[in-house]
């Protein structure tokens, strides 16, 4: 009881503070034409009530979080049968996981035909960011290296297609693997000088690398047409046929979707391999992993190279989708956005990165209804996420291995 | 000298002006249990770090003779190369892969004995699958040998302290070593756990056919376990011999307890 009074008191103080702080902007309005001041006292009451309620609510949520309770108990709204269901365990069950995945796949396949061109285009962007997120996740989530220059590889991919098409007339399907491989080479190029760096220092060097790439593209006019960029990049052709815009949009969506599945497939396999384990060991403790026989040099280089590979691929798609590239598309913001996706979604978790990409890309689009408050709400969602789920929306679940013990004991006796 | 497995000659390690290890020579024979002791900051761990390649020694020569192989010089090699040649170590302040499972920790230990690369991982060729299958069994077998198999899928950081120490030894064994370097394996263990550790180390030596070189502060463990002891103080080797000899050595007693002051 005493506690509740305390809470109310604290919220009251917060609301008084807010009333005081917002007084000059919310209450006083000076009319400079007629030289009179209008006092809008009613605004003050609204601010007071609003901040009181918000503060009380906020405190309650933080308390709940400290106790480890669920923030919102959704099970209350569910029928009793579903109430005790553990979502994670249910989804781990293959019998349920398969139909769910098939339904999701069908929904993804049908989506561009149901939704309009605008929706399809946004969704393609979201899919592109899923691939970017999964790629960067190799370096950050698994390798544990803070990489702020991811946009550079994205740029390498995009410019590979743009320049090869401009100068040699090379098409999308040839440029796609070329862009990816070239980005991979750039990844290794960056990997060498940063072999000895970690943490903040690594972040600064990767950031610098991305800026170098961007500034070179901006200033080397003969090569990249400078800030004005390269236009008239063709969309992917369908067996040599040029497609009209609506069909081409759907076509690009389908290509990107296929590449998302390809990425998930490859990344998951890498994760559960000898190499993936080495990446994680390096993240956990570089010295110990080296002493256990992990070659840090190759492990780091492969992480950088394989991370960059996906960025290069998406870069080619980006160039084909927008038909225009210029250096302004590959700023630091782009790298930070992909980093946000990983942190928000859940570091190291494939599902988390997918969910994170969808939220980060789609949320600002669908918040357009709130027009000027769009970015404010977006920021608020990010802050709330980080306060209440600092490990990301979906945390990585470690693979559990099962060992056939009977087989083992018979094998052991032979030794 | 054919059964010497590790031979260190005149090893010196400088950090700027500080000489952490000063002209230390020692040699370890096959299947011995040898201890390196000394007061704090005597340079024991630095010595280990030089042998395992974490530091490149300023001067001196380190040679190893793996069983049925030729003697080779290993100073200046990278740690992972040295591990590949058959030296494995544990750390004084436990350095497990905290957020990985116990089994995965062991699997990393086997890393250098496996071959599959990027393409193998993506295409999962029959040879890769076979390798992974074998890895799983081998890793579990090692856990069982050390007696921590019930933690198999737990995160390393959630293990009790004693089990974490054992996991470090298990992880080192997974690299298939002929020489095992243990850096204070009993630190922080209770007497009961320490006794079990002594049994374990003796058992490992028999079953795995390894030579054991350890740093330890727990004198009961050192005296009961080791066959020979080297004592260092301020980076210099001050005594060597069997436990009985060391117990009576004046310089050792002085290093540990100080000198009486005669007024």
Image (cartoon, coloured by chain):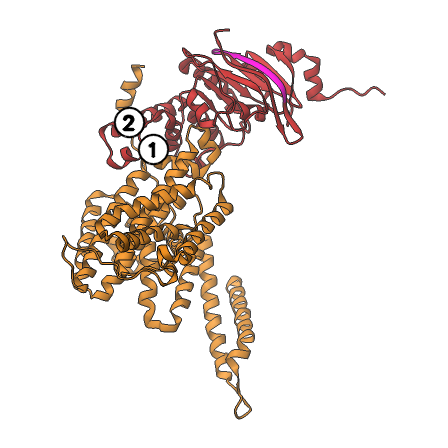
- Residue at image position (46%, 36%) is A285
Q: Residue tagged by mark 2?
A: B131
Identify the residue at image location x=28%, y=50%. Answer: A85
Whole-Å distance between the Cαs marked 1 and 2? 10 Å
Name the chain letter of the residue that bears numbered label 2.
B
What secondary structure is found at the residue carrying circle 1?
helix
In this rendering, is residue B227 above or below B189?
above
In the drawing, does residue A64 fall left or right of residue B237? Answer: left
Q: Residue, x 44% and y 38% (percent of image)? A: A284
Q: Is mark 2 on a helix, strand or loop?
A: helix
What is the tally of numbered marks visible in this picture? 2
In the figure, is residue A86 to the left or right of A188?
Answer: left
Q: Do labels 1 and 2 share a chain?
A: no
Relative to B95, does residue B145 appear above or below in the rendering? Answer: above
Q: Which mark is residue A274?
A: 1
Is disc 1 in contact with disc 2, using a CB cutoff of under 8 Å?
A: yes
Subunit under mark 1: A
Q: Colour of chain B?
A: red
Asked whether A368 falls inside the magenta stretch, the response is no
The x, y position of residue A182, in whole percent, is: 33, 45
Quadrant of the snapshot with the C terminus of chain A: top left
Magenta stretch, residue numbers: B22-31
Q: Residue B227, which numbered label?
A: none
Please indicate, yes or no, whether residue A354 appears anywhere in the rendered image.
no
Give the residue furthest to the bottom: A34
Residue B22: x and y in percent read 64, 21
> What's the magenta bit mostly, secondary-structure-wise?
strand
Residue B33 x %, y %: 51, 14
Q: Colour of chain A?
A: orange
């Amino acid at each position: 009881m005493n506690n509740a009074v305390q809470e109310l008191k604290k919220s009251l103080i917060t609301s008084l503070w807010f009333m005081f702080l917002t007084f000059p902007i919310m209450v006083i309005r000076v009319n400079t034409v007629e030289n009179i001041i209008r006092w809008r006292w009613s605004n003050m009451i609204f601010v007071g009530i609003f901040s009181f309620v918000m503060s009380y609510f906020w405190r309650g949520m933080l308390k709940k979080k400290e106790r480890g309770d669920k923030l919102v108990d959704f099970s209350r709204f569910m029928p009793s049968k579903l109430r005790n269901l553990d979502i994670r365990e249910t989804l781990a069950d293959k019998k349920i996981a398969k139909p769910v995945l098939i339904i999701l796949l069908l929904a993804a396949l049908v989506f561009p035909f149901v939704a309009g061109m605008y929706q399809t285009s946004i969704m393609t962007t979201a899919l592109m960011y899923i691939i970017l997120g999964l790629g960067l996740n190799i370096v950050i989530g698994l390798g544990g290296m803070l990489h702020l220059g991811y946009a550079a590889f994205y740029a390498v991919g995009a410019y590979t297609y743009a320049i090869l098409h401009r100068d040699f007339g090379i098409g999308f399907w040839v440029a796609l693997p070329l862009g990816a491989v070239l980005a991979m080479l750039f990844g290794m190029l960056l990997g060498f000088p940063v072999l000895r760096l970690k943490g903040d220092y690594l972040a600064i060097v990767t950031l610098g690398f991305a800026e170098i790439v961007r500034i070179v593209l901006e200033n080397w006019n003969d090569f990249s047409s400078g800030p004005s960029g390269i236009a008239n990049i063709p969309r992917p052709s369908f067996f040599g046929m040029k497609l009209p815009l609506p069909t081409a949009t759907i076509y690009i969506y389908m290509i990107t979707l296929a590449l998302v599945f390809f990425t998930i497939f490859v990344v998951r396999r890498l994760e559960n391999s000898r190499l993936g384990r080495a990446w994680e060991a390096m993240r956990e403790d570089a010295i110990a992993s080296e002493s256990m026989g992990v070659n840090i040099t190759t492990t780091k280089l492969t992480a950088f190279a394989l991370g960059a590979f996906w960025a290069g691929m998406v870069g080619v798609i980006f160039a084909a989708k927008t038909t225009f590239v210029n250096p302004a598309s590959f700023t630091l913001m782009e790298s930070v956005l992909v980093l946000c996706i990983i942190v928000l979604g859940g570091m190291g978790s494939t599902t988390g990165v997918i969910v994170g990409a969808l939220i980060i890309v789609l949320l600002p689009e669908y918040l357009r209804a709130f027009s000027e408050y769009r970015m404010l709400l977006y920021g608020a969602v990010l802050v709330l996420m980080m306060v209440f789920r600092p490990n990301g929306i979906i945390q990585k679940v470690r693979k559990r291995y099962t060992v056939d013990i009977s087989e083992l004991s018979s094998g052991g006796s032979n030794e | 000298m054919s059964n010497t497995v590790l031979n260190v000659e005149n090893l010196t390690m400088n950090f700027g002006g500080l000489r952490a290890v000063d002209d230390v020579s020692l040699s370890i024979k096959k299947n011995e249990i040898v201890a390196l002791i000394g007061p704090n900051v005597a340079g024991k761990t630095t010595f280990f770090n030089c042998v395992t390649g974490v530091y490149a020694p300023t001067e001196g020569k380190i040679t190893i003779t793996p069983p049925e192989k030729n003697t080779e010089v290993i100073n200046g090699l990278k740690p992972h190369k040295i591990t590949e040649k058959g030296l494995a170590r544990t750390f004084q302040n436990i350095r497990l892969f905290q957020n990985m499972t116990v089994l995965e920790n062991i699997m990393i230990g086997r890393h250098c004995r496996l071959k599959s690369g990027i393409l193998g991982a993506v295409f999962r060729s029959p040879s890769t699958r076979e390798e992974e299958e074998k890895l799983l069994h081998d890793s579990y077998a090692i856990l069982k040998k050390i007696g921590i198999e019930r933690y198999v899928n737990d995160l390393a950081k959630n293990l009790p302290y004693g089990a974490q120490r054992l996991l470090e030894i298990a992880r080192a064994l997974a690299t298939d070593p002929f020489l095992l370097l243990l850096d204070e394996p009993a630190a922080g263990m209770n007497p009961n756990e320490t006794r079990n550790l002594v049994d374990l180390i003796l058992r490992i030596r028999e079953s795995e056919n390894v030579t054991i070189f350890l740093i330890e502060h727990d004198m009961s463990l050192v005296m009961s376990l080791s066959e020979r002891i080297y004592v260092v103080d301020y980076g210099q080797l001050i005594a060597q011999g069997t436990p009985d000899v060391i117990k009576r050595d004046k310089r050792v007693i002085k290093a540990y307890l100080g000198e009486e002051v005669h007024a």
